[in-house]
Amino acid sequence: MASENQSVVTMFILQNFVDDPWLQDALFCFFFTLLTVAIVGNGLIITIIHRSPSLHTPMYFFLYNLALMDVICTVTVLPKVLQSLVTENTISYGKCLTQMFIFTWVLGSELLLFSAMAYDRYLAICRPLHYGTLMNGRACVALAAFVWFTGALNSLVLTCLVLPLSFCGSNLITHYFCEIPSVLMLSCSPTFINDIMTVIADMFLTGLNFLLTMTSYGFIIASILRIRSAEGKKRAFSTCSAHLIVVTLYYSTVLYTYVRPALGTAGLLDKVIAVLYTTVTPSLNPLIYTLRNKEFKTSFKKLLFPHS
């Protein structure tokens, strides 16, 4: 829908992945499966941690927050994707901004949370004697509050910067949901400030946090290598390997997405990359973090069979 200024923009069109009806049906099944796995898997993590006193530790407290963020991220993006595949692929201006704000909030918070989780593992492995003092209940709550608040503040600033923009010409968003880089491409107004703030936010939330996370793991790996027993090394690596896999996948895809607009668009590749951090990662997190976790599996069995 063409429009000359922002006040008359009432609707955007979300671009479909494909036009072939058979492929759309296949994608619907794929995304519906991911939605189900993400909600059930992360919901299970939240329930088990909440109801298991043995899991009321800093590591599981942060995992609880991660699962909550993954649920919010999934229900913010995927229901509209499913709707677009079977009925209409339009979204109102207000709903687009709402989706943009919530998704950007959760995305930024999750990037910060990964640093908090890496710091927790660093203290647990490299400074075990001081771990209980440095990572007490108050410190955990303070870190979580900082993560959620900073993510919300970043999202509020970036979303508010979109409000003064005017849109004209095509209202086709070349993406499957409302994300800041794809929406900015439709603006008739100068987006220099938006672009600069988006890159700054990306460098801080992605680049700096990735550096902090990798630094923490550098110390962790060095400490693990000094452990003499093979069993000790295996146990230490098992608690960190899952987090490292998720972090690497998440940071690399997010950094690509928010730097890519400055280099031009890659069309389908951009969508595939976005799928990794908006749907695949939230669905895989429950498996990655719990599949090899003996404490979690024990608590899960106790929840299912309380009298066994």
Image (spheres, rainbow, N blue to C red):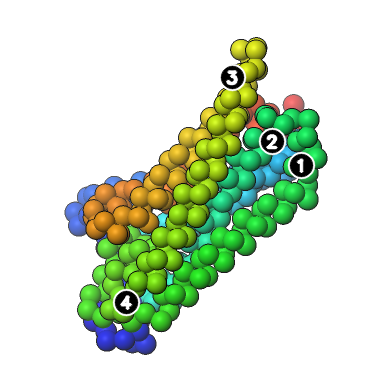
Q: CA distance from mark 3 to mark 4?
A: 52 Å
Q: Which residue is rendered at x = 39% and y = 77% of the image?
A: 93
Q: CA distance from mark 3 to mark 2?
A: 16 Å
Q: Left or right of 173: which side holds 284?
A: right
Q: CA distance from mark 2 to mark 4?
A: 46 Å
Q: Amino acid at mark 3?
A: Leu
Q: CA distance from mark 2 to mark 1?
A: 8 Å
Disc on the earlier residue, 1 or 3:
1
Q: Left or right of 79: which side holds 125?
A: right
- Circle 1/circle 4 CB separation < 8 Å: no
Q: CA distance from mark 1 to mark 4?
A: 47 Å
Q: Which mark is residue 134?
A: 1
Q: Left or right of 124: which side holds 156?
A: left
Q: Amino acid at mark 2?
A: Leu
- Circle 3/circle 4 CB separation < 8 Å: no
Tag 3 residue: 225
Q: Which residue is rendered at x = 24% and y = 58% of the image?
A: 264
Tag 4 residue: 190
Q: Which mark is residue 123?
A: 2
